Image (spheres, rainbow, N blue to C red):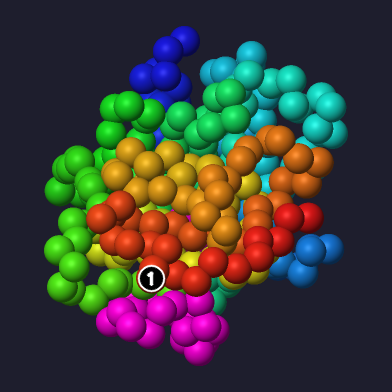
Amino acid sequence: MNNENLLTIAIESAKKAGAEVNKHYKKGDYTSEIKEDNSPVTSADIAANDVIMSELTKLTPHIPIISEEVGALPLEERGKWERYWLLDPIDGTGEFILGSGDFAVNIALVENGWPSIGVIHAPDHNVTYYAQRNVGAFKETEQGVEKIHVEAYDGQRPVKVAVSRRQKLELMGQYLNPEFEFEYVALGSCSLKNALIAEGLADCYLRIGPTGEWDTGASHCILEEAGGSIIDSEFIELSYNERDSLLNPDFLSLGSADIPWKNVIKPHSARRD
């Protein structure tokens, strides 16, 4: 099965999971609790996970799966995989609970340690972002499908920084060079902020705090195909399925390579658990 077929499967699976999530979201019919890592999880997360796991297991039984909501195998086993699905059934569970609509279903295919397919489906916004390595990045809405790309930079305009709605801007300030002018764009989930950069509506996103590889896999492929990148806070590329832990270090999602990022953003130690 080629990657074009696998992309179609990923898009359809994400949309089916999104429909399941929206049923719970619109009715307010879900329960929630706090996991051991102090992050929230709802019955909608589990329902979406069940939908995706069922679809992918049925359609691609030969490809293993890593999901945020399912315990991962030890590295000595999963490290041998040449490719696997990487899932976040609801990225932005906190936004789901708050009712902002800024949450998404994330599905990535990782091949030889790098995301080769990425799908982000935001069911409440009825928008889907997707990409395939060396093919491009796309945005699908009710109006149709368009190819997307990071915004060009002429050295004159402000640098647009994507932030969380409740993020303290003072925290961002300590990592940004005050010699540059900045604008802030607020949005919910991690993947949707990365998608915002991919379609040229923001230039960067600084993630300070814990995330998992499932939070970045799909948007990493989309952002790269749109002309951007995701690196850790020491300007080193992120890696996938190479460590015992699936937690990411602090990371930077970046748009146009014409922006002098090493002058704009102050490097700092990246946590690696």
Relative to 51, does residue 158 appear above or below in the rendering? Answer: below
Corner quadrant of residue 55: top right
In this picture, is 272 found above or below 14? below
What residue do we see at 39% from left, 57% from top?
A: 254
**Hey, what amino acid is under mark 1?**
Val
- Asked whether, in this view, residue 109 is left or right of residue 162, the answer is right
Residue 49: where, in percent of width, then height?
A: 63, 43
Query: In this orientation, which residue lies closer to the viewer: 236 or 166?
Result: 236
Residue at 30%, 52% (x, y): give it: 257
Q: Residue at x 18, y 56 (%)?
A: 152
* Residue assigned mark 1: 264
Label 1 secondary element: helix
Residue 178 image offset from top left, x and y in percent: 38, 85
Q: Quadrant of the C terminus?
A: bottom right
Residue 209 placement, left or right of 142:
right
Question: Could you classify mark 1 by the number of other residues whose Cα lies within 10 Å: few (under 14), some (14-19), or many (20 or more)?
Answer: some
Q: Is residue 94 magenta?
A: no
Residue extent of the magenta highlight: 165-192
Which one is in front, 244 or 199? 244
In the orientation shown, which residue stands out farthest toward the top? 1
In the rendered structure, does residue 170 fall within the stretch colored magenta? yes
Q: Position of residue 171 (x, y in %)?
A: 54, 84
User: On the rendered structure, is 117 left or right of 29?
Assistant: left
Q: Is residue 232 visible?
A: yes
The quadrant holding residue 263 is: bottom left
Looking at the image, residue 14 lies above or below residue 95: above
Q: Position of residue 96 (x, y in %)?
A: 53, 67
Residue at 37% x, 42% y is: 224
